[in-house]
Amino acid sequence: MDDCLFCKIAAGQIPSNKLYEDDQLLAFYDIDPQAPTHFLVIPKQHIDSAAALTESDAALLGHIYAVIADLCRQLGVAENGYRVVTNVGADGGQSVKHLHFHVLAGRSLAWPPG
Ligand code: 5GP
Ligand code: ZN
């Protein structure tokens, strides 16, 4: 999508602090971290949000969660735990309209979220 920040990051047109990349997805650190470890995982393909997912995205989602689990192990945060969040729409707090999964770790996270 032409005017999408995360499509531009996925295409390398806007720089990011990359953690991992393959043909399907990109993981990079959030510019405004909300925890000692805070990175985002995005599909390279533009999807508006989790509300636009269909059954045909099952393999992509499995891959995203497997990569998140691997990255958390590599970063040493898997043992203490972490949170994976995807915000949807205005009430969900979504500010970038390209599906992304926040991965937050390194501190005890409150529940319920604000
Ligand atoms: P949302 O509010 O849509 O759930 O999350 C969007 C996230 O993207 C926010 O946590 C915000 O800090 C992050 N973000 C926005 N612009 C950029 C950017 O240019 N680079 C990076 N690395 N993160 C960004
Ligand atoms: Zn996009």
Image: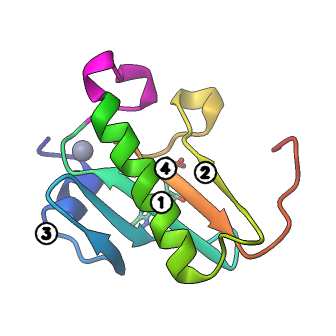
Mark 3 sits on what residue? 13
Can you tell which mark lies on residue 101? Answer: 4
Q: Secondary structure at mark 1?
A: helix
Disc with the residue nearer the chain's start (4 vs 1):
1
Quarter of the figure with the C terminus: top right
Can you tell which mark lies on residue 1? Answer: none
Q: What is the three-letter code of the residue carrying label 4?
A: Phe
Q: On the rendered structure, is 14 left or right of 2?
A: right
Disc with the residue nearer the chain's start (3 vs 2):
3
Q: Nearer the viewer, residue 93 or 53?
A: 53
Mark 2 sits on what residue? 84
Q: What is the three-letter code of the residue carrying label 2?
A: Val
Mark 3 or 4, closer to the camera: 4
Mark 1 sits on what residue? 68
Name the residue located 69 percent from the left edge and 69 percent from the top edge: 105
- Cα–Cα gap, marks 4 and 1: 9 Å
- Cα–Cα gap, marks 3 and 4: 21 Å
Disc with the residue nearer the chain's start (1 vs 2):
1
